[in-house]
Image (cartoon, grey):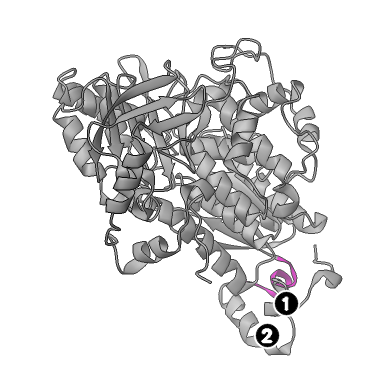
Amino acid sequence: MCIPEHKILSTEISSRNVVTGTARAPHRAMYKAMGLTDTDLDRPFIGVSHTGNEATPCNIHLGRLAQKAKEGVHDAGATPREFSTIAVSDGIAMGHEGMKSSLISREVIADSIELMVRAHQYDGLVGIAGCDKSLPGTMMAMARLNLPSVFVYGGTIMPGFYNGKQLTVQDVYEAVGAYDSGQITLEALKNIENYACPSAGSCGGMFTANTMASISEALGISLPGSASPPAEDERRDKMVYDTGVAAAKLLELGIKPRDILTFEAFENAITILNAIGGSTNAILHLLAISHEARVKLTYDDFERVRKRVPHIADLKPGGMYVMNDLDKVGGVPLMLKKLLDRKLLHENTITVTGKTMKQNLDSITIPPQPNSNIVKPLDSPLYKAGTAVVLKGTLAPDGAVVKMSGVKITKFSGNAKVFDREEDAFEAVSKNQIKPGDVVVIRYEGPKGGPGMREMLAVTAALVGQGLGEKVAMVTDGRFSGATRGFMIGHVAPEAFVGGNIALVKDGDEITIDTETNRIDLLISEEEFEKRKAEWKPRKPNYESGALAKYASLVGSAAQGAITSPAW
């Protein structure tokens, strides 16, 4: 296998810039110190990036999977070079100051992969990821570098079992609320804690990691069927090996991420997001990936697609089942086939196989579903329209998002209880100070204000655990975990830190939310708005040095994906 000489220019990223010619003898010497031969050096180099670490069960096995990817790359005629990058555990960072690092890690992951590839001039890339931000971070780097690349997911955790019920980490968070309100005993809480997470792999429901893995198939940036096999299933090893082979093949085909990540591919991604009832974080991440792919994507595109796509997968957190159950009935290809048959997908988008979406799906045979409750027929969906809803109004002029899967109400009006940090809101919830009819407002938690848009799972799960999931609403310029359920509105933009209208809310103000009309409004007069705007004063940043301060100084609005842009 070789790279055609006419494609190699000194200004392009190419391993030949590093290993060809007498001037590169020192470089070759260093490679030979790592065991490479002249034959290895004559081959194209493919970076094998992974986010393996001991911070989270989602990623603990990724170093082992990287070896399978390297085998595939090597057997396909290229030379693999393994490297790792960071990953933050959203579950372990949740509910405290550490969560501010989570979204920031998405940018660091993308930047670090870019820097490794640029520094060493790798010709292509395999990207292996597990926990939430490592998936979009890896895909962002692929789009940015625009070198032949294939993404592969580390796989889902198996569900835990207790008292005959499937468990995920979501159940542990909600059990905390149930315990605080006296609904369960400390012994029951401990048992749920002990049984919820039995293995390696990412959180088991259709939370952010499984959502983004499913989206990777719809985008065409990963191999068909790669999203659903569990982390410790032997099929996962083969899938990662095949990903290494596919990356080497893409070098020969000359197919690059921006050939795959077209506007139509992003519409396919929005389609699967709504069909599976996936995480609202996917909206933020798709906006960021599309920016790197140089594709213009807006909230209007999300709403346009959502309204024509039914929600058909009954998956946690709003439903009954987990990713492992979806895998048993055909995984993401089953979903994509159903959508394609109804002409809800763009069938001619190119994928990492070198074939179109339709060609890939036509080659996959899926047996009849043994359980049609997991994925409903399109004629009898869970919801006639998708569940990742964008709202706008006087409280969020630039937009906000809410996930409606599993939510039975579409409208809510109530009076605000305002908190300027997550911890204060959680304390109020744990002390049973939130009552039916309240709208819990948590602000100064946005991209700049937090910084980092903390996820509010500890608060939302505690509310659900107390039985308040649809008896209260919550509104924040921060984010929600993919495991969040209930009437919870996030990503409010503009955020409080830049003087957005959420900064003007006072205790007792009436707030109305209507997902049928896509409205979220603060019911005060125009004169009162102007008076409060005149009185509002900017706050001092929470961090004035270090990574969080750098991020806060560069990050933009959640309505554009909370991307970081150069200051000039």
Along the line of sight, the residue nearer the viewer: 114 or 559 = 559
Which quadrant of the figure has residue 434? top left
Determine which residue is flagged by label 1.
Answer: 11
Mark 2 lies on a secondary structure that is helix
Are there few (<14), some (14-19), or many (20+) residues within 10 Å of tag 1? few
Question: Magenta stretch: residue 179 in it?
Answer: no
Residue 94 location in percent, x, y?
31, 43
Along the line of sight, the residue nearer the viewer: 451 or 502 = 502
Determine which residue is flagged by label 2.
Answer: 24
Mark 1 lies on a secondary structure that is loop
Q: What residue type is labelled 2?
A: Arg
Residue 449 location in percent, x, y?
34, 54
| In this rendering, position of residue 154 left or right of residue 408 | right
The residue under the point 72% across, 72% down is 12
Q: What residue type is labelled 1?
A: Thr
Question: Magenta stretch: residue 41 in it?
Answer: yes
Residues at marks 2 and 1, CA–CA distance in whole angstroms: 17 Å
Q: Can residue 519 be seen in this view?
A: yes
| Magenta segment boundaries in residue numbering | 35-44
Which quadrant of the figure has residue 152? top right
Q: Are marks 2 and 1 in contact (CB under 8 Å)?
A: no
Q: Could you tell me how many numbered marks the image carries?
A: 2
**Earlier sequence position, callout 2 versus callout 1:** 1
Residue 248 location in percent, x, y?
73, 56
Q: Can residue 443 be seen in this view?
A: no
Frontmost of labels 2 and 1 is 1
The residue under the point 45% across, 53% down is 52
